[in-house]
Amino acid sequence: MKICLSTCPPAEADRLAEALVQERVAACVNVLGPIRSRFWWDGAMQSDQESLLIAKTSDDKVETLIARLQELHPYDMPEILAIPVETGLAGYLAWVDAETLARSG
């Protein structure tokens, strides 16, 4: 299992989360925020209000999730990080696998 993190504009968070779950590339996406992010972009310090997406996916779907999120994301260079899950409740891990393997629609 992998946990994928991505920040996005708050107005886009629900659209992105819903698409990832609807398309079965994530079993669940939590939307946190608003958060304040500070970062360098185009040679200047930036400060933006964002939402943080926390998507749970199977090892088999992580590359598909990354590609799809990049396609859907409004940023030129979105933050998309995949973090491996070493252990967890066996039933929850099995649920994530089952939901990301299920057919969409």
Image (cartoon, helix red, strand yellow):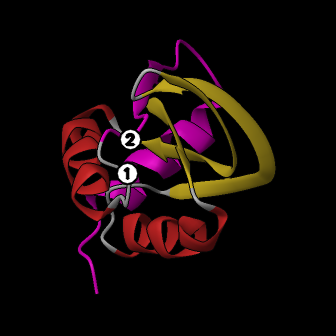
Residue 82 screen position, x and y as percent: 41, 26
Write down the residue under mark 1.
75
Q: Is residue 44 above or below residue 72?
A: above
Mark 2: amino acid: Pro
Front-lying residue, 17 or 93? 17
In reply to whether residue 87 is colored magenta, the answer given is yes
Image quarter hosting the C terminus: bottom left
Disc 1 to disc 2: CB gap under 8 Å? yes
Left or right: 14 as drawn, with respect to 36: left
Boundaries of the magenta span:
77-105
Front-lying residue, 49 or 20? 49
Q: Residues within 10 Å of mark 1 (few under 14, many from 20)?
A: few
Left or right: 16 as drawn, with respect to 65: right
Q: Which mark is residue 78?
A: 2
Q: Residue at x 55, y 57 (%)?
A: 28
Mark 1: amino acid: Tyr
Q: Residue at x 58, y 59 (%)?
A: 9
Which residue is farthest bottom?
Answer: 105
Residue 93 screen position, x and y as percent: 53, 37
Q: Determine whether the residue tagged by mark 2 lies in a helix, strand or loop.
A: loop
Residue 40 screen position, x and y as percent: 52, 21
Left or right: 41 as drawn, with respect to 24: right
